[in-house]
Image (tube, rainbow, N blue to C red):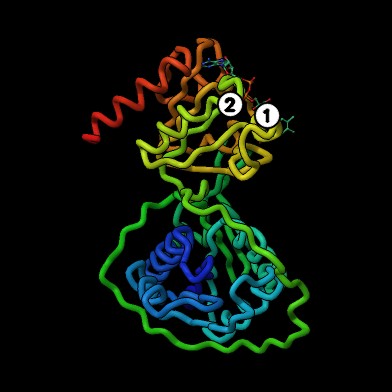
């Protein structure tokens, strides 16, 4: 038995969620007395690949084909299936990010392998292969036993803190059998937001709702985010109204985030908002209405006017950090 981890990259950089998946896969390998191999698609520098060793990968299979820099899910699943066969892998691990959500189910169908999407614990291998995951928008847990011979798990981002070790990985070139006919989608243009912490990887998020009254007031949230090194997010009505870009929308129909700290300002705490943020480790709510439902989900709450509280909080953070 061996463990194969799909370690995805963006523009040549291995994603933080991929390192988390590698660490998770390496721990399963340790638990089951097997070895962990990471699979990387596309052009990635040798130093980046070597870093995977620090999180427990013993070997890295590198398919350096430029056509795999940003592959469509079906192609990535085909390559992963070939790597599974080559390594005789029985456990395959993904990050539960956009790539993992698209590729893992396709691989599952190809291999007829059971899949647990969004695992929050290491599998219990004492009695089968039982993996814990959130259900009902994080209101309950399910313990799922994967009984198929091949088992696929995707790991919920930010569920396991990264701990870099001193391990090293050998890198092996991997040339999957691909023809031009496999590539049915071509990316014509990529537009990226630069200079911001990606929401799904952020450790701290400052989020604003309709209580902020208008886009012109976001400066105080950005100042707080800047002081904390945080990303900014918003409730859905805020992004629907065009006050903030759609890539900041969190909740049931937006991004699911699990930062260490989520600060919600002027957000009521509707169930659809909570569905995307209630996995946060610590939630701080600032709202002028003491009856706002969000306070029930909060670890800390401040009843007060955002326009009064937020600047004071920013000053306090700056003072604490010595700025
Ligand atoms: P409001 O509910 O209007 O709350 C504003 C809050 O600001 C209030 O609690 C108020 O007390 C407070 N406030 C006002 N002034 C101040 C002040 N000066 N200082 C401090 N506090 C102040 N919503 C999402 O966010 N994400 C989703 O993904 C999502 N998906 C949805 C999917 C469906 C199918 C449906 C039906 C709804 C969805 N919604 C989603 C909408 C959701 O139901 C709520 O309407 C929305 O979350 C409310 O946004 P809000 O908290 O910003 O605004």
Residue that lies at the very extreme toward the left in this rendered image: 322
Per the image, label 2 sits on a secondary structure element best described as loop
Which secondary structure, mark 1?
helix
> What residue do we see at 51% from left, 54% from top?
194
Q: Residue at x 21, y 34 (%)?
A: 322
Q: Which mark is residue 237?
A: 1
> Is ligand 1 less than 8 Å from the beta carbon at label 1?
yes
Of the 4 image quadrants, the one containing the C terminus is top left
Crowd band around label 2 with a 10 angstrom C-alpha radius: few (<14), some (14–19), many (20+):
many
Please report whichever mark, 2 or 1, sits nearer to the chain's N-terminal start.
2
Residue 76 spot, x, y in % from top left = 64, 73
- Residue 63 position by quadrant: bottom right
Identify the image quadrant of residue 71.
bottom right
Residue at x 62%, y 70% (from the top left corner): 70
Q: Residue furthest front?
A: 216
Query: Along the horizontal axis of the image, is 321 left or right of 68?
Result: left
- Name the side, left or right, on which 256 lies relative to 46: right
Q: x, y (%) of residue 120?
A: 49, 50
**Residue at image mark 2:** 209
Residue 316 at least partly seen: yes
| Nearer to us in this view, 215 or 231 | 215
Q: Evaluate if marks 2 and 1 touch, with contact meaning CB atoms under 8 Å apart.
A: yes
* Mark 2 Cβ inside 8 Å of ligand 1: yes
Badge 1 local density, few (<14 within 10 Å), some, or many (20+)?
A: few
Residue 188 tag number? none
């Amino acid at each position: 038995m061996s463990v194969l981890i799909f370690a995805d990259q963006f523009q040549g950089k291995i994603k933080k969620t991929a390192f988390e998946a590698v660490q998770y896969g390496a721990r399963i390998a340790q638990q089951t007395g097997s070895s962990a191999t990471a699979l990387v698609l596309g052009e990635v520098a040798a130093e980046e690949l070597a870093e995977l060793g620090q999180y427990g990968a013993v070997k890295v299979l590198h398919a350096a084909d430029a056509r795999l820099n940003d592959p469509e899910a079906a192609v990535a699943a085909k390559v992963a299936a070939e790597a599974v066969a080559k390594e005789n892998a029985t456990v395959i691990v993904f990050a539960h990010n956009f790539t993992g959500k698209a590729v893992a189910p396709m691989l599952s169908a190809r291999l007829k392998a059971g899949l647990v999407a969004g695992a929050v614990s290491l599998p219990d291998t004492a009695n089968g292969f039982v993996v814990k995951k959130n259900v009902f928008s994080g209101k309950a847990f399910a313990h799922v036993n994967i009984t198929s011979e091949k088992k696929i798990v995707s790991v919920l981002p930010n569920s396991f803190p990264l701990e870099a070790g001193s391990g090293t990985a050998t890198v092996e070139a991997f040339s999957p059998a691909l023809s031009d006919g496999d590539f049915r989608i071509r990316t014509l243009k990529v537009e990226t937001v630069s200079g911001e912490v990606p929401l799904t990887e952020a450790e701290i998020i400052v989020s604003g709702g309709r209580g902020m009254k208008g886009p012109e007031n976001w400066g105080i949230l950005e100042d707080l985010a800047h002081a904390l090194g945080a990303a900014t997010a918003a409730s859905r009505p805020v992004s629907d109204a065009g006050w903030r870009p759609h890539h900041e929308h969190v909740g049931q129909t937006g991004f699911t985030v699990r930062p260490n700290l989520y600060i919600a300002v002027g957000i009521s705490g509707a169930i659809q908002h909570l569905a995307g943020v209630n996995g946060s480790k610590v939630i701080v709510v600032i709202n002028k209405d003491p009856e706002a439902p969000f306070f029930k989900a909060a670890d800390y709450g401040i009843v007060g006017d955002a326009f009064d509280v937020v600047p004071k909080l920013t000053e306090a953070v700056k003072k604490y950090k010595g700025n």
